Amino acid sequence: MLCSCSSKLVIPAAVFLLAGPLTFSANAQASSSNQPAPRQSSSSQSLQEKAPSLVDPAGPTISLVSSEQVFVMAAALNACGYDEGLEDSSPIRKRVRDEINDALAKSEDARAKRDKVCLYIAQHRLTGTEHDISQYISLALYLSPPPALETTVELTEMPPDSTQVVEIAPLLRDFVAAVDLHGIWLAVHHSYDVETDRLHDPLSKMIVSTNLYLKMPATTYEGRRFVVVIEPLLSPKMVNARVYGTDYVIVVSPVNGSIPMNAVRHTYLHYVIEPLLYSRSNAIERMQPILKEVHDTPLEFRYRSETVALVVECLIKAIEARTMDTGIPEYKIPAGVERSDLPRYEHERQFTAQKMEAVRVAAVHHDMTQGFVLTQYFFEQLIQFERDAVSLRDTIGEMVYGMDIEQQIHRARQTEFDKQADGDVLQRSKPRVLSGLDLAESKLAQGDFATANAMAHAALNDRSDTLDSVAQEARANFILARVAIVTGHPDVAITDFQKTISTSKDPRLLAWSHIYLGRILDLDCHRDQAVSEYQAALASRDGQQDTRLAAERGVKAAYAVKGHSCEDDADDSGPAPPTKPGPAPAANSQKPQ
């Protein structure tokens, strides 16, 4: 039971700055997150998801496959009105939908089984985004093949989003049998094989070219898997990238032998690079001051709160800029030209190279203005890397340890950041207009606490009878709790965090609520209770690296801020010194020069 903190406690805004607002986005597990997560430490190994059923521990390190489990789940979604990207999809999708409709037209029982599946999906529509679809794909990866369609591991070993819809499995099993989806799968499986064959060479070319640039062989990571799953029944715009322990799985929909290869390569770069940087997380922690410089950028929350996540993404973006297709053909000096003409041709070659480099530099500048403020540093380091024979594995330490942090902070302060973030290739493909609690989150991030507070209260007062009313209440209380933190009302914050925990089923909301409570308890010198909160955050298992690392740090050491110490409190019976440095700066405030 969480005790009330003493009235003398003043919570510093740093508590808010370190955790920040949550980002609710499509494909949140891809690490959202939607982005890939690191290999988990031994201290949290028991909380790590086991590999999905399609990952063969004895199989190849990198594979391109299809999955009947993903097929039947995607087919059920299509039968229940999932039409996104239909016009742009492979003909296989229309063929399967037609065969399912024929089976439904012939059987009242099949229609009844379909209706039960569709009712379940309708009752679990949470966001109106691709996240609603991705949770079913997450579950499908952990199902055994038909006709059983049973979970292949214990629920506690599965990703949180998949367990939220696991009750669809028996309904799906009945629907599959009623329309003979296994028979349809056998009829179309050859078409899947054709798509796989068409994608084999382009995917292999991408893997080989990436490894050649990094100077790292594909066998570098024994025991880890990178699996590309094709499913034509999904929208071609949807890229579902996920990390399960040490295994990276990305689900894509091919059309005419093409998939979003840039998104697949982006995920592959995470697969290759994350182990290199997360093994140096202690060294990267010294870059913590950079997070203050990106607080007002449009970056997603994890990049504004975790140094390793920011460093990983900046390095990947630098690699993508160095290796991008600039759209400018490489100039080659014709064979057999006269020696007297060589200067003219050489000048043309250099001019073309300068134009190509200008495109790359412009891409880096764009990434910098988005908030990925270390991209230029890594871009410059990679120029030297390309000249040397050493691999990225051998030189990454020098890149990290040799970084001049103050120089990068100064560079960040000279950058004028964009107001809106680009759509993440691993998340939604179209920007959305913020409203409701999403807008309240944005106002909170911008420092407009009064507006965020008013909008959250308005959401609480809207008691419309909707399926997500409880989720809305929990999220509104979570916003109110963070407003209370930065406005100096810790008791109110505690109450609102407890309300969030008692009403929310969202693992991410639960995890951050427990982390906040743990920090409040640490500042009020209730260490044992604080540890319990951090452990509860770990038990929430939201699958995101920011919460896991924050909770693990809380378990290992008490949260503290400069000027406030529990030892000082024990020696001094007077009031504690103020520890609140003031509210977070607004997004439009002047950056210090």
Image (tube, rainbow, N blue to C red):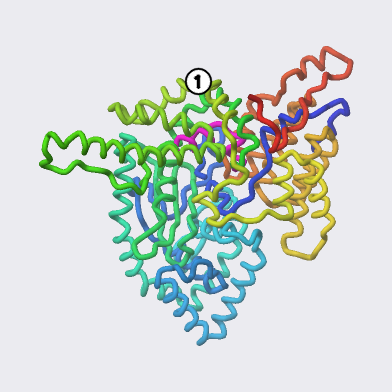
Q: Nearer the viewer, residue 281 or 68?
A: 281
Q: Position of residue 119 (x, y in %)?
A: 64, 71
Residue 533 seen in the figure: no
Quadrant location, the N terminus: top right
Q: Is-magenta flag for residue 518?
A: no
Q: Amino acid at mark 1?
A: Asp
Q: Quadrant of the C terminus?
A: top right
Q: Is residue 302 magenta?
A: yes
Residue 375: image location, x then y, percent:
48, 34
In the displayed structure, 121 sits above or below 432; it is below
Which range of residues does the magenta coloring cover? Answer: 300-317
Residue in the picture at 41% in, 51% down: 55
- Where disc 1 sits, the SS reads loop
Q: Which residue is mark 1?
A: 404
The x and y percentages for residue 96 are 44, 75
Residue name at image x 39 percent, y 52 percent: 261
Viewer-nearest residue: 36 or 387:
387
